[in-house]
Amino acid sequence: SINCEATVNEAKSEGRTDLIPSIKLRHCCLLRNQRCLTAYLYDRLLRIRALRWEYGSVLPANVRFQMCAEELQWFSQYKKSLAIFMRSLGGGEGLDITQDMKPPKSLYIEVRCLKDHGEFEIDDGTVILLKKNSQHFLPRWKCEQLIRQGVLEHVMS
Amino acid sequence: MNMQSYFPVPPGVGMEENFLSLDDILLSHERLPVRSDCAFPRLGFLEKSADTQDIAEGTKMELPLWLTKGLYEKKRKVVSVELPKVYREGWRTVFNADPNVVDLHKMGPYYYSLGSQLLHFDSPENPDIAQTLLQTFIGRFRRTMDSSQNAYNEDTSAVVERLDSLEKGASCLM
């Protein structure tokens, strides 16, 4: 089979220009592998970025387990950039743009609890016990992240 | 998990590929009938049909698009690309007569994209190929769009089955 370095040297030192098509073909294969790997890694980053928007800033352990060190570092830097950006909005007051990604139809929503999640405090100080299968009428913005995490389910009538 | 925030790299437009697009990587995996116009020494092991050390000049092979594009040179004869059946005059006549008749998923599924990529290989039929691709898309566009608007009323799976991958993306039926 073609040992590339030896062939390249032979082509150069012995003027074997007839070997060039084969060298070029092998080069195409190397470029192809490089392209596939790069596109794969880049697609992973796009999915990891989407996780910040879909899931929140703390990733579950089973997802973190699938990520390499560089990806974890990238996620941490991305969420920091996003946090800095969000704090700068609204004249310095800050705005969480990861909430209300679709225009909300109402301020309060009916939710059902899909798993036990313990106590949950809402803005007026009331504490709700999120027990599996319990239903509650809660402010939308408080629930959004728990809905995305699969703890609560929006009950549509 | 809902992944509405995931925006993959889209395929390139026309004759361009996007380097990072997974769709374009899949597209460039498609094979083309090709003839070698020079010898490829020591690569005989790639050609399973013959048992030679070298690939001889004039060997007919089916090479993936990525390799064909990489080897092809306008000025020098390295490889010659034959037109796959679907892009030849016979089929072009069928497309020109009635573009809606054809099952593009079976004929492709990358009929438009691969056809656009073929234009890289300087066939004298390029202007006709380009024209047929365009007219076929225009001819079919109305029907695929009509179906996607009426998705609630009809079983659209029969229509979707016969669409090329570009049409599927455009009609949002999937």
Image (tube, coloured by chain):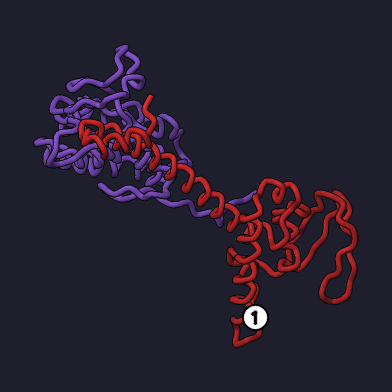
Chain colours: A red, B purple
Give the residue drawn at x 60%, y 87%: A91
Give the image location of residue B8, x and y in percent: 48, 51
| Residue that numbered label 1 is attached to | A94
Q: Is residue B40 above or below residue A116?
A: above
Q: Chain of mark 1?
A: A
Type of amino acid under label 1: Gly
Outermost residue on the front side: it is: A13
Label 1 SS: loop
Between residues B91 and B88, which one lies in front from this camera angle? B88
* Residue occupying the point 44% across, 39% down: A33
Q: Residue at x 34, y 26 (%)?
A: B106
The tally of labels here is 1
**Residue A117: percent from the left, percent from the top?**
86, 55
Asked whether the viewer can see residue A101, the reply is yes
Could you tell me which residue is drawn at 27 percent across and 28 percent down?
A: B32
Residue B169: x %, y % from top left: 40, 44
Residue A49, compared with residue A44, is above or below; it is: below
Q: Quadrant of residue B159?
A: top left
